Structures are given as structure tokens and as C-alpha cells.
Image: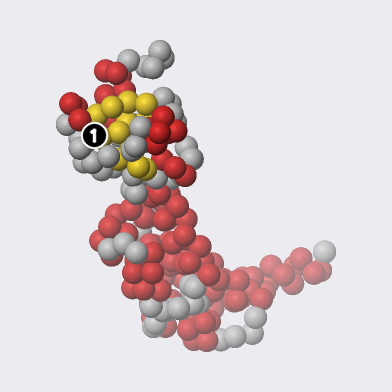
């Protein structure tokens, strides 16, 4: 432990400082668990903490990896970001499912409230806003490249009501769907003439 003092390491643990992940590990004597400095578990009592320069040292001394921060999965393991990335993949793949927002937290294995907070903290928007953007972008694509009517497009992309679709489309694209389609058709005609 030549680079970091125990005081500095303790400060990193108490602050859940991810900058120190991989630089050292700490173990809690009373639980027998080894964690990363950024572990979101309750901060242990200082007198129960032992520091290690490597995970192997801690494992050799009989400590087991924390199931929350997973120090055994490498320095780049980011549980919160991984959960949100999975949610985004599922939303992009199942945007047409009208019930996806209600189903998603259970499928990921976290509570609805925690999912909402976590998603907003990582992405800067709510899951509902994110899904609405995906649906509007898909609707715009269908308006530009298909002959489906607006109601069929609304249902195809997962909106439950036509009025909700029209309102969301206008807010996101600045035009109602019918006008958007006409503008796209005129733009393509002009492009074809060139």
C-alpha cells in the first residue's frame, strides 16, 4: 500500500469514489466480504475494514466477492449503467409493445420506482420519454417510407391512442403526422428531379 494511505483509501470508501476502483479493494471483517471502493452498500465501521492492493489478496485471506459491486467481474463492471443499457436495448427492440414500460422493471429484476430513478440518473430522461422518442422516430420512418395510414402507424409503433400519437408526434417533430408525410414526399420529389 505504498501509493495510497489508509486514510485516503478510507475517504474513498466513505465517498463511494469510483475513481479508485481497481486501485485497491476493501474487505469487511464482520461480513467476510470484499468490495470495490465505489460499492453502494452501507459504509462499514472503520474498525472492521481491511485494505488490499488486489482482489486475489483478499480472496486468499478468505474474503468473498460482494454480490452488489462484483469486484470479481473486473474494473469496468458498471452495474447501474449495465441495467440501463439492457433496458434501452429492450425498449428499442420492443417499442411496439404497448405494455413494455410496465413489464420492463420486473423483467430486469428491480422495482418500478428504482428503475425510474436509475434510468433518469444515467440517461437524463425518463423511460417514458426515451420510449416516446423511439416510437416517434419509427413512426416518422413509416410515414416517409410506407403507405400505412396514420392510425395503423400509431398502433404499429405501440401508441395506445391516436390522439396521444398525434400530440407526441407534433411535440417531437414540430409537425402533425399528415403534414410531415407531405413535406417528406415533396422533399423526395425535389430530390428525384435533381
Taking the image as shown, residue 85 lies to the left or right of residue 189, namely left
Q: Name the one closer to the observer, 74 or 94.
A: 74
Residue 167 in view in this figure: no
Q: Residue furthest right?
A: 194
Asked which colour scheme the image uses, the reply is secondary structure
Q: Is residue 14 above or below residue 90?
A: above
The location of residue 181, given as percent across then percent down, is 59, 75
Numbered disc 1: secondary structure:
loop
The location of residue 192, given as percent across then percent down, is 80, 69
Which quadrant would the C terminus be assigned to in this image? bottom right
Q: Determine the residue positioned at 38% across, 69% down.
A: 107
Can you tell which quarter of the image residue 130 is in?
bottom left
Which quadrant would the N terminus be assigned to in this image? top left
Taking the image as shown, residue 194 lies to the left or right of residue 156, namely right
The location of residue 25, given as percent across then percent down, is 37, 31
Residue 139 in view in this figure: yes
Can you tell which quarter of the image residue 15 is in?
top left
Q: Which residue is mark 1?
A: 29
Q: Determine the residue positioned at 28% across, 57% down.
A: 114
Q: Residues within 10 Å of mark 1 (few under 14, many from 20)?
A: some
The location of residue 31, given as percent across then percent down, is 23, 41
Q: Determine the residue positioned at 47% across, 37% down.
A: 75
Q: Residue furthest top?
A: 2
Q: Name the one closer to the observer, 107 or 156.
A: 107
Amino acid at each position: 500500500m505504498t501509493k495510497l494511505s489508509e486514510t485516503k483509501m478510507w475517504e474513498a470508501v466513505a465517498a463511494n469514489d469510483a475513481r479508485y476502483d481497481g486501485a485497491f479493494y476493501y474487505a469487511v471483517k464482520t461480513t467476510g466480504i470484499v468490495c470495490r471502493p465505489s460499492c453502494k452498500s452501507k459504509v462499514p465501521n472503520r474498525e472492521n475494514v481491511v485494505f488490499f492492493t488486489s482482489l486475489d489478496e483478499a480472496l486468499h485471506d478468505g474474503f468473498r466477492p460482494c454480490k452488489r459491486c462484483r469486484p470479481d467481474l473486473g474494473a469496468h463492471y458498471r452495474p447501474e449503467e449495465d441495467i440501463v443499457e439492457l433496458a434501452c436495448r429492450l425498449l428499442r427492440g420492443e417499442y411496439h409493445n404497448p405494455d413494455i414500460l410496465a413489464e420492463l422493471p420486473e423483467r430486469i429484476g428491480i422495482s418500478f420506482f428504482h428503475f425510474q430513478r436509475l434510468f433518469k440518473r444515467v440517461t437524463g430522461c425518463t423511460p417514458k420519454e426515451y420510449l416516446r422518442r423511439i416510437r416517434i422516430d419509427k413512426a416518422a420512418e413509416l410515414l416517409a417510407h410506407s403507405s400505412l395510414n396514420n392510425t395503423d402507424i400509431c398502433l404499429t409503433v405501440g401508441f395506445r391512442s391516436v390522439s396521444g400519437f398525434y400530440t407526441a408526434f407534433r411535440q417531437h417533430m414540430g409537425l402533425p403526422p399528415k403534414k410531415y408525410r407531405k413535406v417528406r414526399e415533396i422533399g423526395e420529389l425535389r430530390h428525384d428531379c435533381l
